[in-house]
Amino acid sequence: MASEPFRNARGTRDLFPDDLLLIHHLERTAVAVARAASYQEIRTPLFEETRLFQRYLGEASDVVEKEMFTVPRRLAEGSAAPSEQQSSSFTFRPEGTASVARAYVQGGFAKRAPLQKWFYVGPMFRYERPQKGRERQFTQFGVEAFGAQSPTLDAEVIAIAVEFFKRLGFGAELEVRLNSMGDPSDRELWRVALRSFFAPQFATDAAVRCADCRDRFERNILRLLDCKVAQCQELNVGAPDLFELMNAEATAHHQQVGAALLALGFPAIEDRSIVRGLDYYTRTVFEVHYPPLGARSALCGGGRYDGLVAEMGGKPTPGVGFSIGFTPTELALKELHLPAAADLQDLVSAQAPQVYAIAGSEQDRLPLLALTEQLRRSGLRCEFDHRGKSPNAQMKEALKSGARFFLTLDSAASGATSVSLRDQNDNQPRTIAVAAAAAAIHAALA
RNA sequence: GUGGGCGUAGCUCAGUUGGUUAGAGCAUCGGUUUGUGGUACCGAAGGUCGCGGGUUCGAGCCCCGUUGCCCACCCCA
């Protein structure tokens, strides 16, 4: 009985060896810029108890709960009501910060070593409808710095994000867009002020605002500020400014982040439309943009979350971080015709054999296989034809493989003790004793 | 959740107003050539035209349904 062929699940993709060249390049760039600023890697589990993310997302959870990959916990038979099963389920992490903050608290760092600068690179999962640049399984690079509220730390975190893109080849057009959410009490005042400012726009049925904004007014009033509809933007003019309500310390912090960024050579653009709705986000919020990309210019988002560690049950500890999605980064790189081939050359080389062993006859195959193994043990990448191709066809394979050395057993007779080695760099065939082959190749490579 | 577009070989695509046995390039496989910078030539293999139904003497092409993918909106932790 015929069945449908197997396919990958929607919103996922296979990364084949050629695709992984770029992925590895992104990963190593991320690791390099993070380590340069003394950030250490952390790896948390790919899934957590669902309630961790429910706590992390707070009020927004009813909106996003449908967009998470949740699996039920296996309970002893008949031991719990269905509702209880739901609350004790597991969920594949939709982002990195909640898990890292949980680990920070659980590991006791808030008490024994509050200052921790960590980074992570790994897969995240969101049950959303895929579209361009959005997948159900995707990779994020993120950093989280705990234990200091200094504005210079905000600037350092932002600088890591910018440096990541610079090293990937993005140009001077890179922009840091900066805003502040103030402290929670400031934000509460602001929400109240926004509500009374916008309320008249929704008091009548007249469609002065787009339908989405009518929804946002109830659900998430801050999102009114970054509506893309032109008419809505006009109606935002004159809206209450959080900075008018912000406490002096938070205001000073924001100015000092700007000054620190300037000192680092990354002048920030103030952008009041950048908002973060979750309550433990405090003060700094930022995005890194690359305007040449047009509508999809946002590459990175981050900010300060001084209330999060306490929310996770830890000793109150400030924190700041960002996350960068690999998928949008890949799209942007493709559009910019990056990276240059030279940037991947070492990764390409590492995938290619250094030596291709060519069997001149059927009798040569086993002795040659043994020699191949010997070369591999010596640390050389060595390839051997397993399909029994003709010597001519093996030569073509060898050329395609990118191997620098072609090696054949001298076919004098059975029990050959020498090999013919051709180095494509000088193209001089040399005859070498079998026992000396590995050393000769290593010498040529050195 | 809403809306739009597209499904022909492994990949990128042709395929005339509906008309014999559905084509090309690349990739693959085999061979010849070239004692060597991935050449050139010859040949082979590979498709129930996403799937199901309908219209028709006849459907890759028209109609309906379905499914998959893509894109946009929503959301964006």
Image (cartoon, coloured by chain):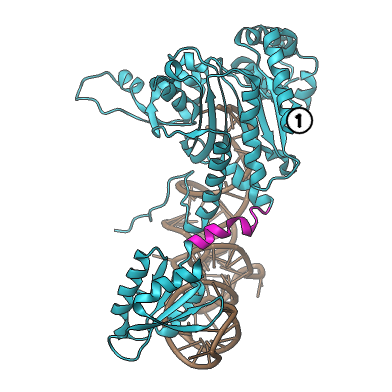
**In-front residue for pair A102/B43:** A102
Give the quarter of the figure containing the N terminus of chain A: bottom left
Q: What residue is shown with label 1?
A: A267
Amino acid found under the numbered disc labelled 1: Pro
Location of residue A270 in the rendering, given as x and y in whole percent from the top left corner: 75, 25
Q: Which of the chains bears the disc numbered 1? A: A
- Is residue A253 visible in this depiction of the protein? yes
Question: Which is the main secondary structure of the residues drawn in magenta?
Answer: helix
Q: Colour of chain B?
A: brown
> Up-down: is A327 above or below A112?
below
Instruction: Reply yes or no: does residue A251 show up in magenta.
Output: no
Q: Which residues are magenta?
A: A337-350
Location of residue A40 in the rendering, given as x and y in whole percent from the top left corner: 49, 34
Among the chains, which one is cyan?
A: A
Query: Which residue corresponds to the image point at 42% horizontal and 78% vertical from the top-left?
Result: A407
Q: Quadrant of residue A272?
A: top right
Location of residue A254 in the rendering, given as x and y in whole percent from the top left corner: 70, 18
